[in-house]
Image: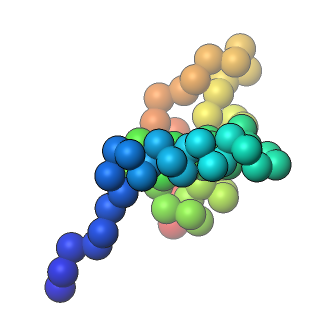
């Protein structure tokens, strides 16, 4: 099986710039970055809750807080 195509750094920057111009830019940027940096799949990102990412004091929690199936 061949390797899946991945974005170059320039392509990734273009996607981030495009997202910045769209409605819900902050949310969409966060979803893209979770996918890229944390290696999360769409279903895993969609199932996240605020408490999975930050604690009650607003501090970012260590990943992964919970296992998704």
Above-or-below relation of 65 to 2: above
At 46% across and 36% down in the image, what residue appears?
Answer: 63
- Residue 51 image position (x, y, % from top left): 69, 35
66 or 58: nearer the eye? Answer: 58
Is residue 63 among the parts visible in the rendering?
A: yes
> Is residue 10 toward the left or the right of residue 42 in the image?
left
Spot occupied by residue 31 in the image (x, y as percentages of width and height):
60, 49
* Number of numbered discs overlaid on the protein picture: 0
Q: Quadrant of the N terminus?
A: bottom left
Asked whether 48 or 38 is in front, the reply is 38
Left or right of residue 46: residue 9: left
Tell me if 38 is positioned left or right of 46 in this view. left
Q: Residue furthest left?
A: 1
Measured as percent of width and height from the top left, residue 53 is found at: 61, 34
Vertical order, 16 against 68 (above or below): above
Question: Toward the viewer: 10 or 56?
Answer: 10
Q: Is residue 27 visible?
A: no
Instruction: Give the residue at the far right of this rendering.
Output: 23
**As drawn, 7 above or below 2:** above
Q: Which residue: 35% across, 44% down?
A: 9
Residue drawn at (65%, 27%), measured in percent from left and top? 54
Residue in the picture at 58% in, 23% down: 60
Q: Position of residue 52 (x, y in %)?
A: 63, 39
């Amino acid at each position: 099986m061949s390797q899946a195509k991945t974005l170059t750094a320039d392509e990734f920057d273009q996607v981030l710039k495009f997202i910045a111009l769209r409605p819900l830019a902050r949310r969409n940027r966060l979803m893209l970055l979770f996918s890229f940096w944390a290696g999360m799949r769409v279903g895993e990102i969609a199932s996240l809750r605020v408490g999975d990412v930050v604690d009650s004091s607003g501090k970012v929690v260590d990943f992964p807080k919970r296992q998704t199936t």
